[in-house]
Amino acid sequence: MSTTPAQAAYDVKNMDLADLGKKRIEWANQSMKVLQIIRKDFIKGQPLKGVRISACLHVTAETANLAITMRDGGAEVALCASNPLSTQDDVAACLVRDYGVPVFAIKGEDNETYYQHIMAALDHKPHLTMDDGADLVTTALTKRKDALEGIYGGTEETTTGVIRLRAMAKDGVLAYPIIAVNDADTKHLFDNRYGTGQSTIDGIIRATNFLLAGSKFVVAGYGWCGRGLASRARGQGAEVIVTEVDPTRALEAVMDGFRVMSMAEAVRLGDVFCTVTGNKSVIRGEHFEHMKDGAIISNSGHFNVEIDIPALEKMSSSKRTTRNFVEEYSLKDGRKVNLLGEGRLINLAAAEGHPASVMDMSFADQALSVDYLVKNRNALEKKVYPVPAELDKRVAKLKLESMGIKIDRLTPEQEEYLASWSEGT
């Protein structure tokens, strides 16, 4: 990878960590074959020349490779964190030192610093935003309307963010078109299911060293993330219980072989709990009252609202940190409940997030969507758009090719048959 000196203001934990970050970025790059192909095209064509991009994403080695791809395509990129606990400080330092990307992110930053960093990214005066949770867009709409003047498009990485953006569009306040990268097949079918499934289990085990085999593992929510998590927990030997509010998803979980029940029932049985719903107060006061002594509670949804932490604080007589990312709450009746990672994304708080090979597809979608927005900026309305189908298919095709896999193609006869209605029995 080529290097350039840092040329802009930044706020990272320690620049001395940059050497370690460089190795981490290069390790991730080896598994991001699709993004490598796109990067080569970007270097040759410079489709983003002169475009300023502000990105609010998890500052990880995989994200670094996306930022470098954007930069090598001609863009000026500024990056801040989309979660206070997800930043890899060595990666942040390396991006600044070796690639000239201004980064505003420190693992464990408080809420005030988190939003100061978002403000710093908006000071970049972006033409495009890249979001993971819609905090960048929301801040621009509510506190930095001056930053909206030059923005003509954006992308959104995660389910929670897309929900927020569609609510903005419904209320008529969305200020510019945004592509819902999360909804691309090559994102949610793989990143959400396989990435979240593996990385969440990784985070829980790293934080606790708890043996999942033989335990009762409660998964709250059976969307794509919940499907992946339930599958991986079962693979570890746990008895998996699913809770849901959607009858169709609940039925699917039953058909997939999982026990399904209400949270009120599940809390009496569960040893480990993980929420992946995108909603708030999924586990709350009346649930803590009936949990086993020693229950482990975690979240892998985007925001730390899925577990009602204020209620837990109120019900507790004391708390202490027993391990990194483990807070033990002593309830007034003597039972103990263990909260992981402050209720934030446990796969990024205690582990490293999704494997690079799955983020390869998600970030390929991001890169191609940014290119699409630049080329079509005058034709798009202020609404949430899907990733164009041809881009989604291109990512899938490139991924298969990178894995050395060939698939069949329709014959002319088959294409004609699928396009006609006259041929029947």
Image (cartoon, rainbow, N blue to C red):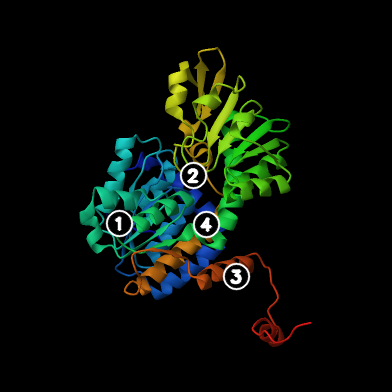
Query: CA–CA distance between discs 2 and 4?
Result: 30 Å
* Residue 67 visible in the snapshot: yes
Do labels 2 and 4 touch, CB within 8 Å? Answer: no
The numbered mark, 2 or 1, whose residue comes first in the sequence reads 1
- Give the residue number, with chain letter if any, for mark 1: 173
On residue 29, the disc is 4
- Give the residue number, with chain letter if any, for mark 3: 397
Q: Camera-side residue: 77 or 424?
A: 424
The numbered mark, 2 or 3, whose residue comes first in the sequence reads 2
Do labels 2 and 3 touch, CB within 8 Å? Answer: no
Query: CA–CA distance between discs 3 and 4?
Result: 19 Å
The numbered mark, 3 or 4, whose residue comes first in the sequence reads 4
Disc 3 crowd, CA 10 A, few/some/many (<14, 14-19, 20+): some
- Give the residue number, with chain letter if any, for mark 2: 278
Three-letter amino acid code of the residue under disc 1: Val
On residue 405, the disc is none
